[in-house]
Amino acid sequence: MTRRELLTAMLGAPFAAAACHTATRPSPLPPGELVGPSDKLGHRLRDLRAQPPAPTRRERAAIVIVGGGVAGLSAAWRLARAGVTDFVVVELEREPGGTARAGRVAGQDCPLGAHYLVAPFAENRALVTLLSELGAVTGVDDATGEPQFAEEQLVADPEERVFYKGRWYEGLYLHAGASADDQRQLTAFRAEVDRWVAFRDARGRRAFTVPVAACSDDAEVTALDRSSMAEWLAARSFTSPRLRWLVDYACRDDFGATAAQTSAWAGLFYFAARMPRPGDDSQPLLTWPEGNGRLVAQLARAATGRLRTGLAVVDVEPGAPGGEGARLTALDAAGELLGLDAEQVIFAAPQFVAGRALRPFRAAPPAHLREFTTGAWMVANVAVPELPGGLGFPLAWDNVLYESPSLGYVVATHQQPGSRGPTVLTYYHPLCDDDPRAARSRLLALGRDEWAEVALADLSRAHPGLREQATRVDVARWGHAMVRPSPGFLFGGARAAAARPVGRVRFAHSDLSGVALFEEAFYQGVRAAEEVLAERGVASPSLL
Amino acid sequence: MGRAPLLYLNVFVIATCGLVYELLAATLASYVLGDSVTQFSLIIGIYLSAMGVGSWLSAYLDKDLALRFLDVELGVALVGGLSAPLLFLGFARLDWFPVLLYGKVFLIGALVGLELPLLMRILREQVEFKYLVARVLSFDYLGALLASLVFPLFFVPRLGLVRTSLVFGLVNAAVALWGSYLLAPLVGRRVIGVRVRCAVVAVILVAGLIKADRLTTLSEDELFADEIVHAETTPYQRIVVTRGRAGFNLFLNGNLQFASADEYRYHEALTHPAMALAAETGVPRRVLILGGGDGLALREVLKWPGVETVTLVDLDPSMTRLAKNYPPLRALNGGALEDPRVTVVNEDAMVWIARGPERYDVALLDFPDPNSFALGKLYTRSFYQRLAKRLAPGGAIAVQATSPLFARRSFWCVVRTMEAAGLFVRPYHVAVPSFGVWGFALARHTPFVPPAAPPQALALRFLNADAMAALFALPADLGPVEVEVNRLDNQALVRAYEAEWQKWQ
């Protein structure tokens, strides 16, 4: 594939033409490597068709947690808080944390995936507890009872800027050049969002809040799930290109899917779930140089000594409550099989893994498994010797390119005290094909060099010369980055079916929430752990 | 011979250039050395007497008069054209600057003095003597008139001293080249050599112009009311020093940091209330200055006899180097940066403050105004919280807090932000003519009343007991307004500051 074909495929033909128009050959690519998940070990699991042989070595733990991502680690954290330590977390990758993992490029901590958290309301007690452990909660507002957050951990101002036709503008919505009709539609859209912020059902529940489990299941709310966000906009005559861009960006940012591929429920969730009261500012964001790696590290402390990485669970015999125990088989990187006997299992891996690991699911795949689809993301970390500038509004935390299929980049040093010097730009590029499998094969067809080429070409439209300045580009390819809240999926019954325990196995993963947020994975892990605690008769006041 | 009238024009231009060099030297001397009456008078005297010396010496030139005339003219072009840039460079680096200055004036005067007698002797054959004398001298005096008009009205305001000097050097060289055509029959085949020398001089002067452009752009020269005597771009900021009749001014990124004429008011007001407040609970021994790389607050601190150590944290090593080595600045801060009690740290204060256990009896925050997000961080609650942890019990903090008149909300934002960091704060103000009304905030861990005047022994120029009391008496138009606390996550101060100053620009 030529550079031009590559850029055409990933960034669009007009841009590729412009980028390749110069007579001079582009300078050599900066060094770097593929980081993040390895598709090799995972795909060995996929290709393991036959029943694995009985392992020669067996171990036991009261509770086995399958998956060391945020859900699994959160379950471990919750168990440890209740004083339960007879558990083991089994993780496929060499590092825990899943898509919230941190990386280190050119000596600078940076995210490899998920990188921020919306500051929770007081009612999200579990999350407030975790954040308090991190020193992120400094007190409680006397008037509202809402938590106050540490200034240094809230996203430092300026938060966002958007690049359009050679210039940066403050904020995410492109105000510059907006017509009166654009402004009117933006106001009308905000009024729609406000209506949902104000909504309370008969039981006093909000239409949208975090976690999803706390949202109203009133028919008026769940009906939103039946159409796409794009259809929802069209039905209300929201035609403003800037507004549609904003909504589309929001969907790609939070769900890795376009507005046309995202349920209207999820689209409105993005805007309404983070707003305390109608007309308020959205809740602030919490972030760290290493992104949600900070949260992962805190959760992982609870699993110290009980975390087994590089171990793929290939078979789960769920056992039966009151009957026989669960029997698991795991495969390590050297190809050795290990048996695990457990009284209880928290299966904190994605649904597509459940379909391959659970013996009854392999024998007769339940219908709900097919409903879960996952999107693909590429994340590139670009090390540069100086903070990038640009015409117009100065560097922000989140720097968005209006005319790009990517989401732009965040600056790893933004939360650090200095205002100068080298940094790492974390560039996010969701692959929003209609068929998620096509996106995945597109993702994996390209290696480090090609993806670095795409990232640098895209960033260079806002920062000419970036390719020459960059000292390193590491690329993470997330084939199954996040569950896609396609229209009809969220309230179609699949999530409820997937959450039902099988034998001694309980499920915990953001898949069950239908939106892949840290908060949701955390909630699912804590919930599953509390169910396990209840079953074991361990008294521990609920955090939920 | 028909070329005589054209040679009168030549005289006219030579006279103009000669006087321009003289005016340049006098203006430059009064900029950098001050005392313009003495400088103008000295330079005129030296210049005219040097012309006399040149005229006298012309009698000893007998051969190749036309060639000598052209070479002298080129000499004037080179020495005169380069005079202003070389004098500026020399001023910042040489102890014997006056020798360079007056030597240069003498050399130019002597060369110009040589020119007219030589020309008159060249034209002697062609023009009757009475007309020759009359016309050469009239054109000479008329040229002087032109110079005295265009120099102050056009060239200095439009081009600045350095470019004016180089441009007139080029005009001089062009006239020499023209002269080489007019006098070609008298010079003979050696005229080629003259023209080569013309080209060399022109190349040198053009190179000077290009270099001057890299030093300061034309638009920048126009921006500043006074002459730029030093300019450099560091990785952090643009530092410009100008010199006008009233003294030196230091600008960072185009914003005035101090004017030497009245900076004592600012720096006494910044320094002594905090020192006096800390002195109420014990002799202030350890002092911290954040920003203030000019060394002027440092100069005030060092007046206190009990001070044992001063740590000055300024981001830009070029700024502290300038304060240490640049003669006018060093004179103004009294060589404070070389005091053995002083440690200079070139680091971002936001990074520095989070580190290290040392505590200070007094902290002075002399940052530039919060006109960027990077500077805004240094005025946040988070920053003041960290600073408060570095303050010894009984210690005091003073913060420059922009103008309470021009930027009232910004001023109160600083005050409220410091309060939000758990400090007890008293806002105060002072009139600094070159800034206007300026604001500060004095703070410590416990409630306090404004301190009494600093000891008489400090011999302050501004801050006596009456002035100290007046600092803390805020007029109604500077009174409190409702403002948001400045935090890292809202940068409320930068936004308020930008909105407020926009009104005045």
Image (spheres, coloured by chain):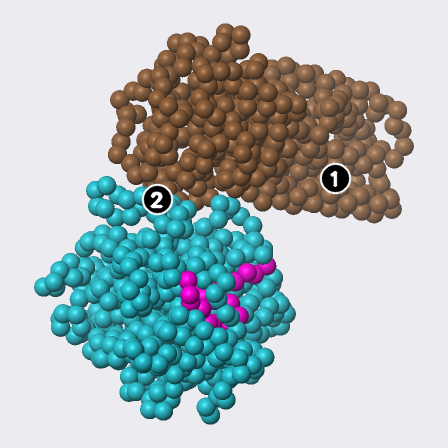
Chain colours: A cyan, B brown
Q: Quadrant of the C terminus of chain B?
A: top left
Give residue B33's position: percent from left, percent from top. Answer: 63, 21
Which residue position holds label 1? B176
Q: Quadrant of the N terminus of chain B?
A: top right
Provide the secondary structure element on which disc 2 rests.
Answer: strand
| Residue A105 is covered by the magenta coloring | yes
Give residue B376's position: percent from left, percent from top. Answer: 42, 40
Amino acid on which the number 1 mark rests in the picture: Ala
Same chain check for tags 1 and 2: no
The Cα atoms of the two marked residues, 1 and 2, are separated by: 79 Å
Name the residue nearer the viewer: A421 or A291: A291
Q: How many marks?
A: 2
Q: Is residue A8 visible?
A: no
Image disc number at residue A367: none
Start-end of magenta stretch: A85-106
Which residue position holds label 2? A138
The chain under label 1 reads B
Name the residue nearer the viewer: B88 or A246: A246
Give residue B222's position: percent from left, percent from top. Answer: 51, 37
> Residue, x 66% and y 43% (percent of image)?
B211
- Side (left or right) of B302 relative to B463: right
Which quadrant of the structure image shows residue A212? bottom left
> Residue, x 28% and y 84% (percent of image)?
A368
> Residue, x 58% and y 56% (percent of image)?
A107
Which quadrant of the structure image shows residue B210? top right
